[in-house]
DNA sequence: CGTACTATTGAGCGACCTCAATTGGCGTGG
DNA sequence: CCACGCCAATTGAGGTCGCTCAATAGTACG
């Protein structure tokens, strides 16, 4: 906790240096993130309201359910999870977020966050003050468009997850999930077959609506069947094609 | 600006008559729908791009998966459902929509609809050309805000549904669903305890991730337990309090 | 090298599904 | 008006997928 304060105080110097290196227009994630499609001038305007490079440690929260909306967060590196809770502690993970993805838009309606956002590993994020962003989007049509697109995408992803949890068997869910990770890694320029699982088996279960033991058993079974090999957090998909075929 | 009202050559008179009765500013759903928070001038501008009063019959689709995004739809009366499909015909209903709610925003990302939207009963909708709406939102900050709010709300609702399907037992799901219907009816100025189910048991099952028989059995059980009474599509909730208590 | 956590594997059980028969509601046509 | 057919809803019987509980094995880290 005290560390967070210190880094805030040192902020001025550190951040200004960082921002030179990390301006949107020089960011490797530019075309996955909010600035997609903006021209140089507009990107600069966006740059001015973004606070770059806050570091969050594993287990640390960007926000919790019920907190007022202050910032959106763009992930630069690392991985996060968002979750919703039931009164008695039951948890549903609603998404895993990777670099280039935006967190916090769930809170625009109601001004309070409806989920928790927690770092799965040490991560870097850009903080984007919501009020200023909304104001800026009013003047930059590309930014408004991108914001709407982004939220629409979130709706689509949640719809997909609903379909998985509501209508797929356990093994289909896990395979679909792995394919999803594969595609997202590819988007980031990484291997589509060698997947790093940033989360625990428990987290995967809480995401897919399964018990952690079921996830573990399925990994073992898929390995027996030659679909993949697992070693802890690392999964190698032997044949993307074979996996696609299993999902009819 | 006020002359642009008659941009359609055909039936200027017809439209103007209809628009008197149905103009956003006179619509009873004004404060639930897109115009919420707009001043008179802005609402008029919105009015000009909205095509009012298309009627859809039961079973008719507003759009289907894969179709390009043309319009958003605001429901004036009736009820709709949105659904996603798996290759082999398995279906997941992702939402039921009532008057004042907006359909189609799932397609903003990717320009193609990701779900089917089908009328559960004869309904009336306003058609809102997406291109024009986005353009208009660029000039009317209240409209941009409302649009963002609306999509954020959709994200929140889907998150709730995920939590229900992923982590609740069958009886909890149905009760939570009924409470949700109760609240939405109340918002429309109707009774919170006497609920009309606009959809079949099959639809409810496909929404909650349950078999239709399970839904039916649960209704019978709840009736035995005195939580509610059922007669076909009509449900009377005996005690909202008792139902809340059952959900811890 | 020990401690603590995460993952794997096994055994048994129960919630919910599937299949099937029955009932009820409603419109159509005799 | 009733008979009939059609579809939605209810109810029953039996099966199974995935959960729970529990023991073991592997891994990270001081």
Image: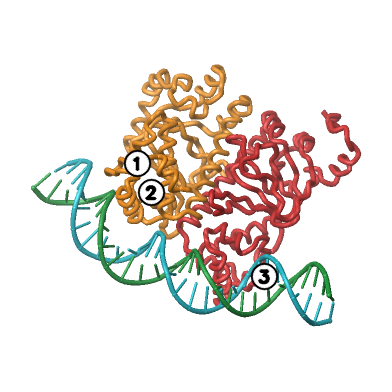
Chain colours: A orange, B red, C green, D cyan
For label 2, the residue is: A204
What whole-number distance in Å separates the C-alpha atoms at marks 1 and 3? 48 Å
Residues behind callouts 1 and 2 on a single chain? yes
Q: How many marks?
A: 3
Q: Are marks 1 and 2 in contact (CB under 8 Å)?
A: yes
| B70 left or right of A114 in image | right
| B187 left or right of C17 in image | right
Front residue of A125/A201: it is A201
For label 1, the residue is: A197
What whole-number distance in Å separates the C-alpha atoms at marks 3 and 2? 40 Å
Q: In the image, residue A195 lies at what x, y percent?
A: 35, 38
The quarter of the picture where the N terminus of chain A appears is top left
Dot placed on the residue nearer the N-terminal end, 1 or 2: 1
Can residue B110 be seen? yes
Q: Quadrant of residue B226?
A: bottom right
Can residue A54 be seen? no
Q: Which mark is residue B232?
A: 3
């Amino acid at each position: 906790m005290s560390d967070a304060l210190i880094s805030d105080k040192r902020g001025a110097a550190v951040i200004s240096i960082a921002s030179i290196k990390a301006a949107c227009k020089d960011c490797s994630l530019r075309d996955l993130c909010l600035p997609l499609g903006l021209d140089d001038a507009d990107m600069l305007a966006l740059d001015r309201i973004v606070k770059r490079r806050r570091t969050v440690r594993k287990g640390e929260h960007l926000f919790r359910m019920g907190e007022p909306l202050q910032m959106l967060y763009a992930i630069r590196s690392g991985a996060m999870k968002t979750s919703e809770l039931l009164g008695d502690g039951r948890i549903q993970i609603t998404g895993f977020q990777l670099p280039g993805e935006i967190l916090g838009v769930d809170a625009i309606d109601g001004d309070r966050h409806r989920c928790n956002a927690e770092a799965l590993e040490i991560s870097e994020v850009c903080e984007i003050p919501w009020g200023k962003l909304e104001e800026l989007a009013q003047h930059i049509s590309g930014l408004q468009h991108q914001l709407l697109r982004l939220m629409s995408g979130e709706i689509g992803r949640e719809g997909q997850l609903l379909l998985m949890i509501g209508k797929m068997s356990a093994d289909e869910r896990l395979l679909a999930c792995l394919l999803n990770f594969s595609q997202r890694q590819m988007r980031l320029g990484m291997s589509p077959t060698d997947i790093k699982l940033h989360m625990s088996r428990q987290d995967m279960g809480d995401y897919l609506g399964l018990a952690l033991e079921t996830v573990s058993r399925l990994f073992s079974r898929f390995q027996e069947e030659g679909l993949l090999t697992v070693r802890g957090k690392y999964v190698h998909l032997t044949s993307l094609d074979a996996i696609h075929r299993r999902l009819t």
